[in-house]
Image (cartoon, rainbow, N blue to C red):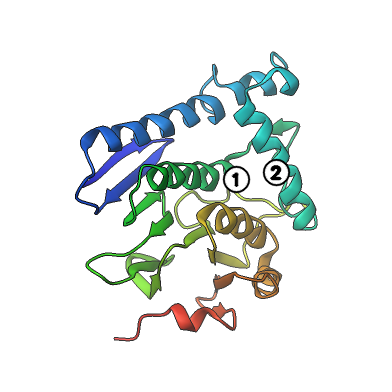
Amino acid sequence: MEETRLIMGMPITIAILDTSATQADLNTVFTYFVAVDNIFSTYKPESEISKINRGELLLTHASEEMREIFALSAQTKQETGGYFDIQHNGAYDPSGIVKGWAIRNAADMLKMWGFRNFYIDAGGDIQVAGGKNGQSWRVGIRNPFNRYEHVKVLVLTNQGIATSGTAIRGQHIYNPHNADEPLSDIVSMTVIGPDVYEADRFATAAFAMGRKGIQFIEKLAGFEGYMIDAHKQATLTSGLERYVLHQ
């Protein structure tokens, strides 16, 4: 079963290949994403994050999910030398960590229900489990200069992959150490990690680092990266090649 719905301002696709999957299973996962959006959307005035930003809700009185995201964000800020920070211009925007976190939670739900072969794709950030027709999942890295072209096709099993960049949403990522300077050196940073939450948060931080972000990913155990700069040049971490599909 496979279905796509527009939630959180982006297409979210869930595909479950196990024959026992039902429409109710898909509905439950999509309902979870709607609930996440209702808590964390900075575009919804009644969301918890909007109330926190207006001073109407204290973090100590917020939901368990909100407190978890703030704790994970603080952890990520520390682990990235301050290149990941959900606070900007006096407001909080946790979108750089919420998406991967929500996808991983949704994947955990499917695993808990006994499903083994599925993928969840939310706006290009993907968690895969098992495989398709006895083979690993194939995931393409889009060319940021031509959205209809893949620069690489990767072979993944039980991993997450996330891309941060400016091709779709423009300049929405910033360097917390110099927030007023636009990030123009690189256009795309793709990260493979043990799960999509880990890949997503470190892809965001690595993009904020600019050209040195790929070096940061290189040093992370269990992660690989693929960076494309503004001059259309790609830089790969040393272990990424083993995931590339060679036809």
Give the SS element for disc 1: helix
**Residues at marks 1 and 2 touching, judged by CB atoms closer than 8 Å:** yes
In the picture, the disc for residue 132 is none
Where does the image place residue 74, in percent across and percent down from the top left?
75, 43
In the picture, the disc for residue 73 is 2
Point 51% across, 23% down: residue: 44
Where does the image place residue 230, in percent across and percent down from the top left?
55, 70
Point 53% across, 30% down: residue: 41
Does residue 179 sit above or below 42 in this rendering?
Answer: below
Going by the image, does 118 lie left or right of 170? left
Where does the image place residue 200, in percent across and percent down from the top left?
56, 54
Q: Is residue 4 visible?
A: yes
For the residue carrying disc 2, how many other residues have a C-alpha within 10 Å: few (<14), some (14-19), or many (20+)?
many
Give the SS element for disc 2: helix
- Which quarter of the picture shows residue 118? bottom left
Point 70% across, 69% down: residue: 216
**Numbered marks: total:** 2
The amino acid pointed to by label 1 is Ile
Going by the image, does 232 lie left or right of 53? left
Q: Which residue is mark 1?
A: 97
Where does the image place residue 207, in percent across and percent down from the top left?
63, 61
Point 29% across, 36% down: residue: 25
Does residue 28 sit above or below 147 in this rendering?
Answer: above
